[in-house]
Image (cartoon, helix red, strand yellow):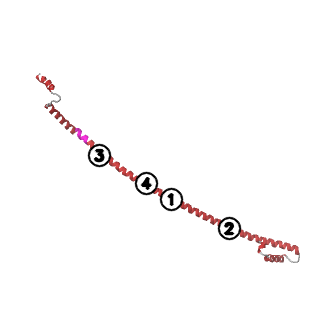
C-alpha cells in the first residue's frame, strides 16, 4: 500500500504555479503526438481544401473577368449594330422620301401630259365640229337660198343652175358673216 499512499501525496503536493517536470514532459509528448496526428491526418486535407478553395476562387474571378470582357464586347457590338441600324433606317427613310417625291413628280408630269392631250383632243374635236358645223351651215344656207330663190324666181332656171349660182354667191360672202 505504500504506492497508493504516495499517489495522493503527489497529487496534493503540486500547486497551480508549481512546475512538475513529469507532467511537463507528458504534456510535451502529448502535444507532439497531437501535432503528428493532426499533421498526418488533418493538416494535409485542411491545407489541400484551402488550396482547392483558393484555386476555385481564382478561377471564378478569372471567369468573371472573361465574362465581363465578353459582355463589354457584346455591348459594344450591340451599340455599333444599333447605330448602324439607325443609320440604315435613316438612309432608307431618305431614299423612300426621294422615291415618293420622284413618283409624285412623275405622276404630276403624267397627269399634266394627259391633261394637255385631253385639251388638245378637245380643241381638235372642237375645230372639227366647227368645220362640220360651218359645212352644215353652208349646206343649209345653200338649200335655204335655193328654196328662197326658187320661190322668188320660179323661172326657167333648173335646180343645177340655181345651186351653182347660190354657191358662187355664198363663196363670195365674207367669212365672218358665215361664222
Q: Quadrant of residue 160?
A: bottom right
Q: Is the residue under label 3 in contact with that under label 4 (CB below 8 Å)?
A: no
Instruction: Indicate whether residue 16 is drawn in magenta.
Output: no
Q: Which residue is mark 4?
A: 79
Q: Which residue is mark 1?
A: 92
Measured along the vertical axis of the image, is residue 94 above or below residue 43? below
Residue at the image point whose x is 29% and y is 44% from the top: 54
**CA separation, marks 4 and 3?**
36 Å
Residue at which label 3 appears? 55
Query: Which callout, 1 or 4, points at the residue further toward the start of the chain?
Result: 4
Q: Secondary structure at mark 3?
A: helix
Rendered view: 174 above or below 28: below
Q: Residue 83 vs residue 22: left or right?
A: right
> Which circle's residue, 2 or 3, is located before the other in the chain?
3
Pointer 4 or 3: first along the chain? 3
Q: In the rendering, at what x and y percent does residue 53 appear? A: 29, 43
Residue under label 2, please give it.
121
Mark with earlier residue (4, 2): 4
Q: Find residue 127 and report its horizontal and vertical position in percent.
A: 71, 70
Q: Main secondary structure of the magenta part?
A: helix
Alpha-carbon span between mark 3 and mark 1 = 54 Å
- As measured in the structure, the alpha-carbon distance from the residue carrying label 4 to the one carrying label 2 is 62 Å
Q: Which residues are magenta?
A: 41-47
Number of residues whose C-alpha sits closer than 10 Å to that of mark 4, classed few (under 14), some (14–19) or many (20 or more) = few
Amino acid at each position: 500500500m505504500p504506492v497508493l499512499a504516495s499517489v495522493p501525496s503527489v497529487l496534493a503536493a503540486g500547486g497551480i504555479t508549481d512546475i512538475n517536470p513529469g507532467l511537463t514532459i507528458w504534456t510535451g509528448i502529448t502535444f507532439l503526438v497531437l501535432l503528428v496526428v493532426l499533421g498526418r491526418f488533418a493538416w494535409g486535407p485542411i491545407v489541400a481544401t484551402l488550396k482547392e478553395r483558393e484555386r476555385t476562387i481564382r478561377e471564378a474571378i478569372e471567369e468573371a473577368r472573361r465574362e465581363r470582357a465578353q459582355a463589354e464586347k457584346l455591348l459594344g457590338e450591340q451599340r455599333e449594330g444599333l447605330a448602324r441600324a439607325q443609320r440604315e433606317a435613316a438612309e432608307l427613310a431618305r431614299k423612300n422620301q426621294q422615291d415618293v417625291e420622284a413618283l409624285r413628280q412623275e405622276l404630276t408630269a403624267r397627269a399634266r401630259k394627259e391633261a394637255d392631250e385631253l385639251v388638245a383632243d378637245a380643241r381638235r374635236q372642237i375645230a372639227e365640229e366647227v368645220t362640220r358645223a360651218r359645212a352644215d351651215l353652208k349646206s343649209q344656207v345653200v338649200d335655204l337660198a335655193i328654196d328662197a330663190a326658187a320661190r322668188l324666181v320660179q323661172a326657167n332656171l333648173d335646180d343645177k343652175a340655181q345651186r351653182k349660182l347660190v354657191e358662187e354667191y355664198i363663196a363670195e360672202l365674207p367669212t365672218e358673216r358665215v361664222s
